[in-house]
Image: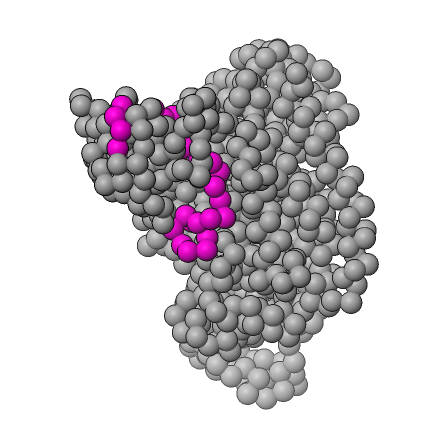
Amino acid sequence: MKSFEDNAKLKIWGKLITLYILSSISSLAFAQVTHKDLSQKDIFKNEFPKTIVFRGEYVGSVHTNCNVWSNGLIHSDGVFKKYVSWDEHVAANPVTRDWVSQYAKDNPEKLMLIHYNFREHRNDQPGVSDLFSPAHRVTFSGTNLSADIDASTTAVSVNKASLFNLTYPDGSFRYPCVLIVALDGNGNRLWDQSEIVLLKSVDIDSNVLTVEREHALTTAKAYFEGTYIAPISTRLGNSGVFDVNLSESCPVIDGKTAADVILDQLKAILTDNDALIPDLQGISYDVLKWKPRFDFVDTNNDGISDGGIINGEDKWRNGAIDLLARIREAFSEDKYVLTCDGWEHGDQRSLNLLNGMESEGLISNQDAYRAFSTPINTFTFWQERCTSDYKLNYVATKVKNSIDIPNEDNYIRFASGTATCLGVAFTRWHQDYDPVKDEIIAGTENKTHWLGQPMGGMIRLAKNAPDELDGAGVDLTSAFMTGLQGVNCSVIKDGNSIVVTGNQGSDHCELKINDLRLGQANKDLTIYFEIEEVGNAAAYPIPRIVEAHMDGLPSYEETSTENEMHNGLYGFFTVGPATQMSLYYRKAGGRNLDLTLDIEGAGSVRIKNFTVHAHTQAIAREFENGAVLVNPSLDEMSFNLRELFPDFFFKKIDGVSHPDYNDGSYLGGTVAVPPKNALFIQKFQKEKRHSYLFETEGDCEGWSALNASLSVKDGSLSLTPDSAEANVLLKLKNLYYMG
């Protein structure tokens, strides 16, 4: 039997070959449709900041006024939203098609994507519930009725009531819905004779379920003893929104799996002759996961939990890859953009099939700043390794954690600055109040893309600090190698590299680096190393993950949940060139630390250039008209502008949304950035502001002197003390040159 990797690689390469042929044909067919021409889109022109209005823009008065809606998109590069109700073939608003069509044609430079949910779909709306068969829903392990029921029965006797519960194992109170399916004489499920009921209570002792009948637009029926009954996997309890089975093992009903139905829906929305919204230019995948929501679901409908793994083969992941490849075939790469969640382990990582990744929140919607290295690693990988001509990576600047919300504006600026340094887009708000309006349009200048193009790559300030290992992790000294320990793998030195090879049959291995007591007490530590898969072709059809766990970190005086977010940093890698990983630990200096690198898969990997720096993982980037500085530490940090950008001087933005923070002041050689925050600054060339010519006293308006008088003569400023003993203080205003 072929392995998952072999099967998935064959499928992806087959799809890519077909894709190349189809996209070539499709490019001819759409040559004259200007608003479908991706080369015209501002977001692909490498000018910054890049911004996207994302989902929540469709609120309030915007519902009834197209002009209000379109005017709110002026300073964005595009809009990604749920244009249809719960991702079914039903318009969210009767005028959606007309609005989108007009806006797309009036603004061919804007990118418009549908945000489409691949995990869950409705089963409780007329005209929608019949799109998916009950067989296409994900269920948990089930049991059988122990007695007949009629259409009015609400106390249902079953063989094993313990399989049902009002709460999921994570403790959330969600009233899971339940599926009842009749069986034929051979035990086959008769999907057209099914009903969804709402669970109200469970009596485990008597094996009785109390239910509400005819839920989610289904009809109550009579069922015989032995009929199959099972809980449905859902996030929203009794809402009628149920998880969809993307597994290869999903039952085929009327010739279609759940994936077939999804593909048909997307075509009906975007590309069919009578498409609902044909003027959109792509799909922003929402939760197209490579594993089901719960590990104990039954994906092949045999009544037994399998988590998507059947006979050792990952049928769920295979099915998700296949669906993604089929969508890429149907939507040509030159006319349609495909992006997907990429911020969790179970998210998509198909470099060959996607234009980029989305992060929901800088790290997650529950973590505004803690695992800062993770987005640095993941977005750097996608920026460097995605080969699409229309690369699109972006941060959805969500802050949902109640602990973080009081500092929401600062965290959104922090995320926006990080995204801009990485060279990726970020989302903004449609409403009049936007937390980063100043940063998007340079405040009072009101100019989109005011930063212009990058002048070099992202600057990693910690790299310039001394290596606390003094080169031992680069040269791989015997002392350094002695501190390494492999788990489920072999570890050997190969020149200046460490080669780690997982044991046969292992799905992961670990490399432990012990006794890292480095730096001064309470100093931040930033670790760098490079990693790549060994071989000419990847053993996996997707990039692999390396996740770091550090034992011995301090407590950051938060709840245990938030405290754990500072750990578990990770990134992606594949075959060479090597990918640089960073691991940032605040206040970790001087402590006894043990680092574990958990490496996905068993194929050999090469690790090299391991360094540790007692420095904040601050980043910066220079642009044509300004610069961005990002401070991820828990303390204020001073950035030396003369060292970073010696040929220019800077001023703060003249702010509109936050004039106290962006106060328009001119900056000297250094500038302080508050903790967990960013600063966007404007740049001027020194040669444009060299010697100052004084012609009249008006040229030094606003200047003052204590214990002295000011005067102008022959182009010079004269300062005359009141007495020989006077201590003179000169106060200057609008002094531009800082050379």
* Rendered location of residue 289, percent (x, y): 52, 38
Chief secondary structure of the magenta portion: loop
Q: Is residue 460 above or below residue 112?
A: above
Q: Is residue 269 above or below residue 251?
A: below
Residue 697 belongs to magenta span = no
* Rendered location of residue 547, percent (x, y): 52, 28
* Rendered location of residue 459, percent (x, y): 62, 47
Check the picture and name the quadrant holding the C terminus: bottom right
Q: Residue at x 53, y 54 (%)?
A: 115
Q: Which residue is drawn at 72% across and 51% down?
A: 332
User: Of 181 and 416, which appears nearest the observer?
Assistant: 181
Q: In which quarter of the image is residue 642?
A: bottom right
The answer to whether any part of residue 7 appears in the image is: yes
Image: magenta residue range: 122-149
Q: Which residue is drawn at 40% across and 74% down?
A: 61
Q: Residue at x 66, y 16 (%)?
A: 1
* Rendered location of residue 225, percent (x, y): 30, 25
The answer to whether any part of residue 451 appears in the image is: no
Q: In the displayed structure, does residue 200 sit left or right of residue 423?
A: left
Q: In which quarter of the image is residue 657?
A: bottom left
Q: In the displayed structure, does residue 488 sit left or right of residue 500?
A: left
